[in-house]
Image (cartoon, grey):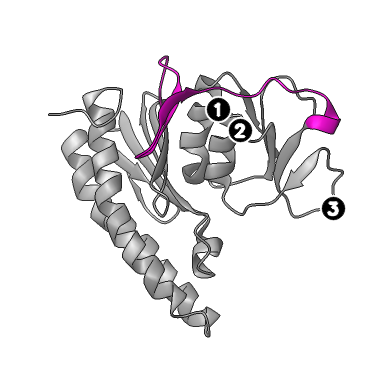
């Protein structure tokens, strides 16, 4: 097969599956814009759209690893117990309000280790991806390049994304985007210097975890999730 992006054949097959699913999501996004007079109706529509993501992409993913399991916020399929696709729609609350800042997060795990990670923003068609041991990259129709975390450490210079419910002390120029998968991708790309969040469903952050690590950053998942460029003390 002709490779679309730099990386393995499996990575490219996963990207093609994302692209096919994203075309439907772009149509759904246009429909949501027409539902803004009824948030209840918009929420129901987006919930159904998320379910369609899982259904439509699964058949494509099983062509990549036919025996793999599946983990999403709503579905768990065991598979062969060795390989597993981890899938989530991140930023669904933004989608509900016809805000284009949302993404599909997709990871392939084998033997309890994430091997391939993709975070795809379907509206602007921008992909962040990584393979274990091969670095992290950003791809769009206009630009493709390896990405790395920033090297900033002075609190006055930092831009930090938060996804927290409490009134904790913050540092730097604070951002709250509502899309954790893209927040992690932006830490990997040096657009943010750190990301701090309450605990999240693993399906939403599995891909971002590998992106941050492959871009040279650090990530800790405990009571909170903290991802940094490795120079920031939080």
- On residue 187, the disc is 2
Q: Are marks 3 and 2 in contact (CB under 8 Å)?
A: no
Q: Is residue 161 left or right of residue 34?
A: right
Residue that label 3 marks? 167
Q: Residue at x 84, y 30 (%)?
A: 155
Q: Nearer the viewer, residue 181 or 1?
A: 1
Q: Report the residue at 61% width, 22% height from top.
A: 217
Quadrant location, the C terminus: top right
The one nearer the camera, 122 or 142, is 142
Local crowd size for mark 2, using a 10 Å CA cut-off: few (<14), some (14–19), many (≥20):
many
Crowding at mark 1 (Cα within 10 Å: few <14, some 14-19, many 20+): many
Provide residue 52's location: percent of width, then percent of height: 31, 62
Residue closest to the eye, 188 or 116: 188
**Residue 82 in sight here:** yes
Q: Earlier in the sequence, mark 3 or mark 2?
A: 3
Q: Where's the N terminus, which quadrant?
A: top left
Residue 162, relative to residue 214: is it above or below? below
Point out which mark residue 67 bears. none
Q: Identify the residue at horizontal 56%, vertical 29% (top origin).
A: 188
- Secondary structure beneath label 2: helix
Residue 128, quarter of picture: top left
**Left or right of residue 23: residue 151:** right
Label 1 element class? helix
- The residue tagged with tag 3: helix, strand or loop? loop
What residue would you read off at disc 1?
212
State which quadrant residue 106 falls in: top left
Where does residue 156 sit, x and y in percent of width and height?
A: 85, 32
Q: Residue furthest bottom?
A: 37
Marked residue nearer the N-terminal end (3 or 1): 3
Real-space CA distance between mark 3 and mark 2, rounded to the nearest whole angstrom: 22 Å
Please state the extent of the stretch shown in magenta in the rendering: 129-157
Q: Is residue 47 above or below residue 111?
A: below
């Amino acid at each position: 097969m002709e490779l679309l992006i730099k990386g393995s054949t499996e990575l490219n097959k996963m990207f093609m599956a994302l692209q096919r699913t994203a075309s439907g999501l772009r149509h759904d996004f246009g429909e949501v814009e027409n539902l803004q007079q009824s948030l209840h109706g918009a929420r129901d529509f987006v919930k159904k759209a998320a379910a369609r993501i899982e259904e439509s992409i699964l058949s494509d993913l099983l062509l990549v690893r036919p025996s793999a399991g599946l983990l999403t916020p709503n579905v768990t399929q065991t598979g062969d117990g060795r390989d597993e696709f981890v899938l989530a729609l991140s930023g669904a609350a933004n989608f509900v309000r016809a805000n284009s800042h949302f993404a599909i997060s997709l990871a392939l795990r084998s033997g309890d280790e994430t091997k391939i990670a993709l975070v795809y923003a379907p509206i602007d068609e921008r992909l962040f991806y990584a393979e274990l041991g091969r670095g992290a990259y950003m791809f769009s129709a206009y630009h493709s390049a390896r990405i790395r975390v920033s090297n900033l450490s002075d609190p006055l210079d930092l831009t930090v994304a938060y996804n927290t419910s409490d009134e904790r002390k913050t540092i730097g120029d604070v951002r709250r985007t509502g899309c954790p998968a893209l927040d992690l991708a932006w830490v990997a790309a040096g657009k943010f210097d750190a990301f701090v969040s309450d605990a999240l469903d693993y399906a939403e952050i599995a891909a971002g975890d590998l992106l941050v690590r492959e871009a040279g950053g650090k990530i800790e998942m405990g009571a909170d999730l903290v991802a940094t460029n490795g120079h920031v003390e939080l």
